[in-house]
Amino acid sequence: MTILVCSYGCQENSSSSEALDNTLLWYEDAAKNWNEALPIGNGRIGGMLFGGIIHDTIQLNEETVWAGEPGNNITQNYYQDIVNIRELLFSGKYEEAQIVALSVFPKNPPEQTNYGVPFQTVGNLVLNFSEQDDFSNYRRELDIRNAISTVTYSSNGINFKREYFVSYPDQVMIIRLTADKPKKLNLSVSMDTPHVKHKISTENEILKLSGTTGDHENKTGKIKFETLVYPKLVGGSLEQEEASIAIKNADEVILFVSIATNFNNYNTLSHTGLNSVQKALIKASNKSFDVLKKAHIRDYRNLFDRVSLELGEDGQIDLPTNKRLEKFALNDDLGLVSLYFQFGRYLLISCSRPGGQPANLQGIWNDKLNPSWDSKYTVNINTEMNYWPAEVTNLSELHQPLFAMLEDLSVTGQESAKKIYNARGWNIHHNTDIWRISGIIDGGFYGFWPMGGAWLTQHIWQHYLFTGDEIFLKKYYPILKSAALFYADVLQETSDQNWLVVAPSMSPENKYMNNVGITYGTTMDNQLVFDVFSNVITASQILDIDTSFADSLKVMRKQLPPMQIGRHGQLQEWINDWDRPNDKHRHISHLYGLYPSAQISPFKNPKLFKSAEQTLEFRGDVSTGWSMGWKVNFWARMLNGNRAYKLIKTQLTLVEDGISTGGTYPNLFDAHPPFQIDGNFGCTAGIAEMLIQSHDEAVHLLPALPEAWTQGYVRGLKARGGFEVEMKWSKNMLDTVKVKSEKGGNLRLRSLEKLVDAEGNELKKASGNNNNIYFQTPEIKPPLISTRATLSELKLPIFKIYDIPTEKGMSYVFYSENQPK
């Protein structure tokens, strides 16, 4: 048998490449509202571009402009309250337990406490143009291949152009204004902000906005921010006014926008941070526009170009993006699907860069002082969902801001563990903010969920599985261990089954009785603790440390409750069979074990798999935007590509500003509503999950390919074990696959098609367990099944499974049996 191989860095001829036109969002009109504006960003600085002709607004954000000041939100020792609530729960007094929880942690915080502070806008840069009328040929676009937005139009026989981008290498926003005739640029440059404490001034031909963020609950706003705008002219003149700058008869104008704050870290503010605002401005303004633009594009495309996706002909690219979205329900505009996929990657590159803050509920884009849910970090799904695309879509380093936040939370979370649960280790609840608060937020119903740290630490483990980076694992192992230590102390033994459960807790934001959500031993909690313990057990083996601690976790893991199949054939959400078939709640938390975890497998536990399917059927498809994004991933894991694609089509339903249903806004932002960025990221991850999966002991090729995606090409998706995959398919069948092996080791492939090498020889069929450490999954307990449940048989297609030994740095090419070589 001969397998085509080449070294990892060799020149390769891709079988296809993504058409440039399908990386454009474009419109025939200026944005009428924020949900039509176009986002740009460099991870730290964000802008929303409206593109008005006479009045152009650029709404500005900086990732550290948050209300409040350093400090946790735990005001006293709550352990005795926890003990009291546990006793009520274990006595079956659930309503009384909920009443006590709400009295200890009221919905509206008392004066001495804080439920988290909001992420806040900086304000607006406003450009007012004069001597322009009789407009034509207007076009506003965002090129996500180069992360550059442009506005072009004609006025009085003159062609005008504006270019906008935010440079990561130079840490400034750059706006270039040009006209095809000299001396035709006449405008004023000003700023405004909703912040109460602010000042706008001009000095040395620089426009300056300085301000201080707002007070919130019992925290005083102490983050100071400065925004500098420097116009660099070719021709013309500049006139400095008290709070604005007038530009007359210029040939070209380049605006350099720099923003900085005094934020240092979650417990330190330092005025030295403000010094960087002028340094960045001076450094960038001494460079030519072409040099700045080339550096920006080179940096950005180093990330973006790693993945290409084509799903057939792009027959609708001549339509404006809002029109494509409006017509999507009536056709299979597969180009819009691939554009939406890449737009999610664009957003992650633009709002999460190493050294910065992780993406919040709105990434870095927010025009309010008090946005919905404060634009905080909601860690019972939303923050995690933001980072689902990071590994699989080849943007691994963009995960770093989340890991940095985990370092902070593992410190602040010790106070929560000690003062609320009398436990070692660390934990947080369902929410946090820039100050890394770890206590209960939003009161004793939504907030009584001590599992935020358990879910967040899964990202550390998944990053290791995708990269195989033992140096990284060693660095973050103490955070994994400390999270496990918390649950080792917190778990309580039930009197009836002798199970170890988390109590009190809830299944995020849902309830099982009228106004009662607090309980113990929820399915999601059990799944999370299983993963927390399993990760530490395996990591201790890999790093050869903490053997006795790992052994103690193995003993406790055996006492965790099994998953249960209830009387309706559903996967139970609760410790008891309380599920309601008519429950349409947006959170389907107990399917965490299906996705993003790997505890529910069609090959190992088909009954659980079918019960998860029944749960999805009960919950339905239509929901909030982010929930539909999660369901795309669920149905991909169910190996049901048609249903996953149906969810994508439901997600890609045009939602205009002010409409109260989930879907997608004209600028392709996810509509919860209002805008939440997690829906974008969830759907991008879901599309990748339809094309490749690697959680179930093999790299599964095209596991959930919809019938409508008859032909296509994808390059650059990542699988666990350090494998990078390129595939081409036609007539709904795999044609060729190329796999790059970054770590070496066994490559196990799962495919519907018979795979052969370049000489037509079938690959070696797999046998036994996969010996590649990155593909080994802990065995779960058999489920408990209600005697009233009716279970249908799971029918799966017959998959071919192959084992291929690989060497580090080599590439391997395989073909379907009927594909010409």
Image: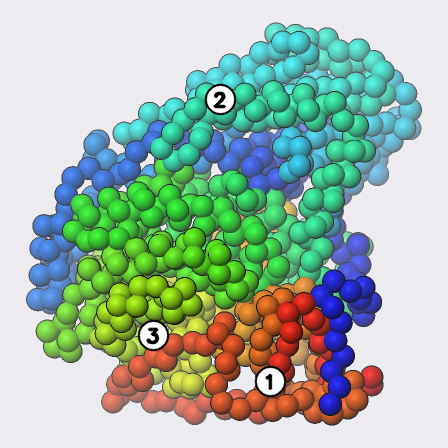
Q: Which mark is residue 803?
A: 1
> Label 3 to label 1, Cα distance in Å?
42 Å
- Can you tell which of label 3 and label 1 is closer to the viewer? 1
User: Residue 281, position in %: x, y?
Assistant: 65, 23
Q: Nearer the viewer, residue 17 or 745?
A: 745
Q: Which residue matches tag 2?
A: 272
What is the crowding at mark 1: few (fewer than 14 residues within 10 Å), some, or many (at least 20)? some
Q: Residue at x 28, y 78 (%)?
A: 562
Under circle 3, the secondary element is: loop
Label 3 is placed on what type of residue? Pro
**Residue at 13% from the left image edge and 63% from the top image edge:** 89
Relative vertical location of residue 415 with respect to residue 5 in this rendering, above or below = above
Residue underneath mark 3: 581
On the picture, is 614 further left or further right than 279? Answer: left
Q: Earlier in the sequence, mark 3 or mark 1?
A: 3
Q: Nearer the viewer, mark 2 or mark 3?
A: 2
SS of the residue at dot 1?
A: strand
